[in-house]
Amino acid sequence: MKRKPKKQDMKNQISINQFGYPKLGAKQAFLSGETDAFSLIDSVNNEAVFAGKAAPTKLIQAWGERITMLDFTAVTLSGSFFLSANSGGQTLRSGVFDIATNPFAALTDGIERAIFANRCGFNTADENNPHPHAACHKKVTTAENAGRDRHIFMLTGETEGHTDFSGGYHDTAEYSRNVYLHAVSLAAFIYSITVNENRYATFKLYGLPADNINITESIVNEIKYGLNWLLKMQDKDGGVFAGIKTFEQTDIIAPEDDPAEYELLGKSVYATVAFAGVTALASWLFRKTDEKFAERLKDASIRAWIHFAEYDASHVIDFEAEAKTAVSGLCYQGTCDFDGVRFWALCELYALTGSEDFLEGAKESIPADICSFSPDNAAGFGLLSVFLHPDGGDLELRRKIMFALRVKADNLTSISEKSFITMEDFGACSNMKIMSDSLTLFAAAMILKYPEFRIIARRNLNYILGANPLNKCFVTGFGQNPVRRPRHTLSAVHPDIPPLAGMAVCGANNDRLFDNYLKWQLPRGTPPAKSYGDAPSSLTTNAVSMPATALLYFLITIV
Ligand SMILES: [Zn+2]
């Protein structure tokens, strides 16, 4: 009997953005194989509406395939379509997709629901939530009470009578909660509002029109929910605890029934500085709609910064150990640029207070990579802060950023000329890196007024949503070929129903070392871009995370 080919072996496919394409702007798909020409066909009446000439075929090393790009940017019709092309003696067609003004509206909604469903300490019963749970993880212990050394405590200090640490989100596949990951995720959500609401006019004017904030209610509720937990994580001395985590084996169990002991991690410099950054940013966001909350956030932000600055002046900080705590729970460990988060916080504090001290600090601590938007380097949020500054930001800083943006965007462009997207090596958390590059390119297009960068930015987004060699939409429950079996404890509690929809996963990873699926089940010699497993055992490729989901949300709101 002939072996039925696995999906992974599928040849000659046309991979598309499975959500569809915005009416205006670049529209591209990938054909695995060769072709000269293709057609765009209206799926309602099967009539061809556009005949395109294919670009020259390229061998994409990381994909292990020859790929032909199909470009139908010229089409600005709305409707449902599919692509058709002749290749290798067969007629191939893509799945059906939309061309619409905003093809991502359902995904935006789905992500907001997913974030709500991942709330900790809250009864998430809701008609739209198929994975509800009762209020969970209200009890938190300290390391001493758990009989453990405070080995993660980087900043010393006591909890000083704090007892309530409930709230926040289960921000990775398990039930832990991490301040640094919350801060980066909330920053992406907040910037999706400020950038989106003012569209590109904001960038053109280099200033945020103060009266034009029209905030979507559900995402603002989630931002507030996350911030309220962050505020609880700040100690009286201004330092911020790194998070809440269990050191026991996590079973597949509903969060409210979880018997594991959860510990309050020590205060950390990453948590404290990222906290200062996100609370300053949030204070700006809420200044018109909730003045009292905005003041509270501002006070918390400044206290956190002062605590860090005093600690920094009198201690030698072990950044390597700190970084491991900062990203604990993500699929990579220990790669986390402190310069990036410090720069971000200083930019936000300058924007909020106007104090020259923060500006000078930001200028003195410009990180090597200023254009990154992910937990391993959050400097890009500082970049946005400078360009969205109410007074236009500092000229010298703007010039430096523009130069760095130009260099990085050119670099990413040359990678994409070889590989279509900006990724070649596919290490851990590749999707996050691809989305971060996409945000960098969007920022470069807007700030440098160079629209070509947007084409590559969109191609990266298309990759995440299905235009990739696995034909996989790297989001749970969305698209024609969604993530079906993510690593996500809450979803695994109910294996009989589909997983919680609307969460992004880590993506292809060429490093098999820490991944049982890749190690034992993926055939040797699988190309890097296909080194992925839609299985809960694939810790490094198929785990969901709040930062990845937040970056996707930010991307689809500015596309
Ligand atoms: Zn919980």
Image: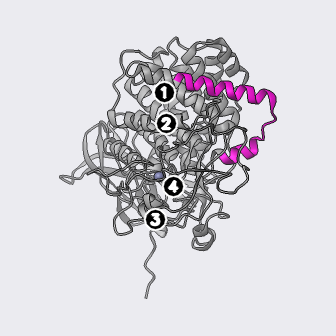
> Which residue is under mark 3?
253
Check disc 2 and give the amino acid type.
Answer: Leu
How far apart, in angstroms, are the residues tagged by discs 2 and 3?
Answer: 27 Å
Q: Quadrant of residue 183?
A: top right
Label 4 CB less than 8 angstroms from ligand 1: yes
Q: Give me the disc on residue 282.
A: 1
**Tag in front: 4 or 2:** 4
Q: Earlier in the sequence, mark 1 or mark 3?
A: 3
Residue ID at (51%, 25%): 297
| x, y percent for residue 291 | 42, 19
Q: Give me the disc on residue 186.
A: 2
How far apart, in angstroms, are the residues tagged by discs 4 and 2?
Answer: 18 Å
- Determine whether the residue tagged by mark 3 lies in a helix, strand or loop: loop
First to last magenta residue range: 298-325
Q: Residue 27 in magenta?
A: no
Q: Residues within 10 Å of mark 1 (few under 14, many from 20)?
A: many
- Determine whether the residue tagged by mark 2 lies in a helix, strand or loop: helix
Q: Give the vertical position of 70 relative to 404 (above or below).
A: below
How far apart, in angstroms, are the residues tagged by discs 1 and 3?
Answer: 34 Å
Q: Give the vertical position of 204 relative to 328 (above or below).
A: above
Q: Earlier in the sequence, mark 4 or mark 3?
A: 4
Q: Earlier in the sequence, mark 2 or mark 1?
A: 2
| x, y percent for residue 62 | 60, 56
Q: Give me the disc on residue 175.
A: 4
Instruction: Name the one closer to the observer, 177 or 447.
Output: 177
How far apart, in angstroms, are the residues tagged by discs 4 and 3?
Answer: 10 Å
Q: Residue 305 in magenta?
A: yes
- Determine whether the residue tagged by mark 4 lies in a helix, strand or loop: loop
Q: Cβ–Cβ below 8 Å for labels 2 and 1?
A: yes
Q: In this image, 180 relative to 133: left or right?
A: right
Q: Earlier in the sequence, mark 2 or mark 3?
A: 2
